[in-house]
């Protein structure tokens, strides 16, 4: 797998800076760090004898440039792959969070739709009962009550009443209120959107 990464020619140019940095670190690690620290570090063998002095240790062969480049390119590819794996895992976690929120939103939407249906049924029943109430009232009393109600509601009630009954109620109303209600009823009766 290491040779597979190092043989990819497209990854080498992008890793030039990274390889140089890693090469410097690798050379420093192989050489043994700074000379001042070499004297401080001493290895004690399990038998209790101290190891040879730092100066007596054999110096290892310094790797050539191609080995350093291959080492750096292998490490860079593995680091990139790990970074991609971490990003993929983070994206999976974010997707799971979004899925949870979508479920909660869908549940709320279903609850809202159910509530809206119940409300519409209730309003339809209420409208029918209100229309029946106004239909049973005397025209002068109905006109007096409808003058106090919201103009749009009064117009809706009048539209649901029998046309003769609605005409008598409008006749009993103040001219200005009757004109307003007639305008609203005419606008609502149009088949084309006035805007």
Image (cartoon, rainbow, N blue to C red):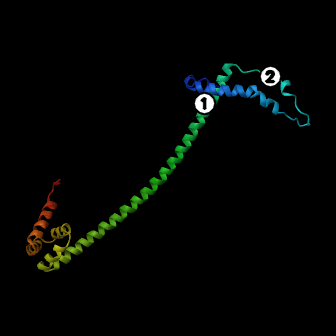
Left or right of residue 42, residue 88 in this image: left
- x, y (%) of residue 150? 20, 69
Which callout, 2 or 1, points to the residue nearer the camera? 2
Counting the numbered discs, the total is 2
* Label 1, residues with CA under 10 Å away: few <14, some 14-19, many ≥20: some
Residue 24 or residue 39, whichever sits in front: 39
- x, y (%) of residue 1? 64, 29
Question: Taking 91 as reference, is 55 above or below it?
Answer: above
In which quarter of the view is residue 189 placed?
A: bottom left
Circle 2 residue: 59
Q: Residue at x 12, y 78 (%)?
A: 139
Circle 1 residue: 77
The single residue placed furthest to the front in the displayed view is 36
Task: Determine if residue 4 is in view.
Answer: no
The Cα atoms of the two marked residues, 2 and 1, are separated by: 30 Å
In which quarter of the view is residue 52 placed?
A: top right
Residue 176 or residue 136, whichever sits in front: 176
**Of the numbered discs in the image, which one, if any, rests on residue 103?**
none
Q: Residue at x 37, y 62 (%)?
A: 112
Question: Taking 40 as reference, is 10 above or below it?
Answer: above
Left or right of residue 111, residue 170 in this image: left
- x, y (%) of residue 105? 43, 56
- x, y (%) of residue 143? 13, 75
Residue 35 or residue 77, whichever sits in front: 35
Left or right of residue 168, residue 63 in this image: right
Q: Earlier in the sequence, mark 2 or mark 1?
A: 2
Quick one: SS at disc 2? loop
Quick one: SS at disc 1? helix
């Amino acid at each position: 797998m290491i040779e597979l990464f190092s043989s990819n020619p497209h990854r080498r140019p992008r890793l030039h800076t990274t390889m140089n940095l890693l090469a410097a670190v690798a050379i420093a690690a192989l050489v043994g760090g700074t000379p001042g620290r070499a004297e401080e570090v001493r290895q004690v063998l399990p038998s209790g004898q101290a190891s040879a002095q730092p100066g007596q240790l054999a110096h290892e062969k310094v790797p050539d440039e191609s080995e350093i480049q291959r080492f750096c390119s292998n490490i860079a590819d593995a680091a990139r792959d790990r970074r991609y794996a971490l990003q993929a895992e983070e994206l999976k976690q974010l997707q799971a969070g979004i899925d949870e929120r979508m479920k909660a939103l869908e549940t709320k939407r279903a609850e809202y739709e159910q509530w809206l249906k119940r409300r519409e049924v209730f309003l339809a029943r209420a409208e029918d009962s209100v229309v029946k109430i106004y239909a049973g009232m005397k025209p002068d009393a109905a006109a007096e009550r409808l003058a106090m109600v919201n103009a749009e509601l009064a117009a809706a009630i009048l539209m649901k009443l029998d046309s003769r009954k609605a005409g008598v109620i409008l006749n009993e109303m103040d001219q200005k209120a009757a004109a307003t209600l007639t305008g609203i009823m005419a606008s609502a009766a149009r088949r084309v959107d006035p805007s």
